[in-house]
Image (cartoon, helix red, strand yellow):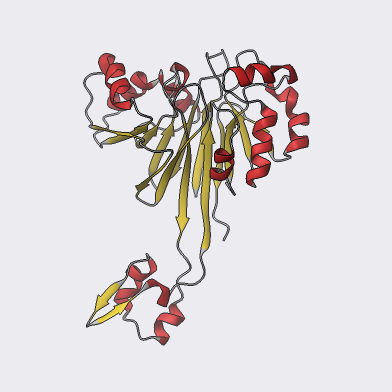
Amino acid sequence: MLEVALLGTGGMMPLPNRYLTAMMARYNGSSILIDCGEGTQVALRKVGWSPKPIDVMCFTHFHADHISGLPGMLLTMGNAERTEPLVMIGPRGLLRVVPALRTIAPELPFEISLIEIQDNFQTFEFDGYRIEAFRVNHNVLCYGYNIVVDRLPKFDPERAKAQNIPLKLWNPLQKGNSVEFEGVTYTPDMVLGEARKGLKVTYCTDSRPTDFIVHNAENADLFICEGMYGEPDMLAKAREHKHMTMYEAAEMARDAGAKRLWLTHYSPSLIHPEEFKKEVRKIYPETVISRDGQNTDLMFED
């Protein structure tokens, strides 16, 4: 199970009932935070989740509404007596931006490892899941992210018995590892069946629509995407500032074959984004006009 919570859905500035951009996912005891707008630590508390187990933070880019909450979040994590190391991933410039923000959060009881993305697409492997960063089209260097949980094929004990594979080798083979024992090499394909579908969440804000986003969101179980404007007359402004409309996000979700679309990163002028739900769903019926605290549990198919 992959848990996902959209902590803040606002863009540019916070509103009384709308925090700035942030999303958190939890899998197998590990937590991943993408973006950390102002007030994220409060939004996290509102959904009942703790900042202490955050293992990885990813930043799409370094505009203030996506990273201004970092010093407060780090202090909150430190006050929770966290000691485990923290990994941060972001565009080039991360090595300069984070130390600058830490001027007001200099002493922490945990180490921070900073990783700058070097390519248009880059994969980062963690225990049980991977994070894929893909470049998008904003007016500064900006990335979207996939959180992917692969699933190994189902283990077939009858095949293992038929080939007289020792019982103590079953576990490493089931985990996809080859094993050599008494001069014989045993491989996972000897005991594993057909591949099974895993889980995938795609997160993208602050961009014009691109084919590369559609490609990376392909078959996502959940596509979280910017829908900054709902008003039809805002398309020119979206183009000018390298953002996108709800309708453009819906078209990408449809073309990517995503199962669900959560819209986020609303303009402060978009006070009631739900007013545009009917028109957006004409393009992509599985669209949700997200709110702060929107959450779901993504389950494996079987």
Q: Position of residue 7 (x, y in %)?
A: 51, 28
Horizontal and vertical percent for residue 134? 47, 38
Question: Number of callouts in the render?
Answer: 0
Q: 119 or 245, which lies in front?
A: 119
- Counting from the top left corner in percent of width and height, residue 277 is at 74, 29
Q: Tell me what residue is drawn at x 38 percent, y 31 percent.
A: 90
Examine the rendered structure and indicate whether residue 128 appears above or below residue 73. below
User: Is 155 placed above or below 263 here?
Assistant: below
Query: Is residue 141 or residue 55 the one in the foreground?
Result: 141
**Corner quadrant of residue 106:** top left
Identify which residue is drawn at 45% across, 21% down: 37
> Where is residue 101, by image quadrant?
top left
Counting from the top left corner in percent of width and height, residue 30 is at 38, 43
Q: Is residue 265 left or right of residue 81?
A: right
Q: Residue at x 50, y 21 (%)?
A: 139
Q: Is residue 203 left or right of residue 30?
A: right
Image quarter where the C terminus lies is bottom right
Left or right of 239 on screen, residue 48: left
Q: Is residue 223 above or below residue 102?
A: below
Q: Please tell me which residue is depicted at 44% across the width and 43% down the height of the picture.
A: 132
The quadrant where residue 291 appears: top right
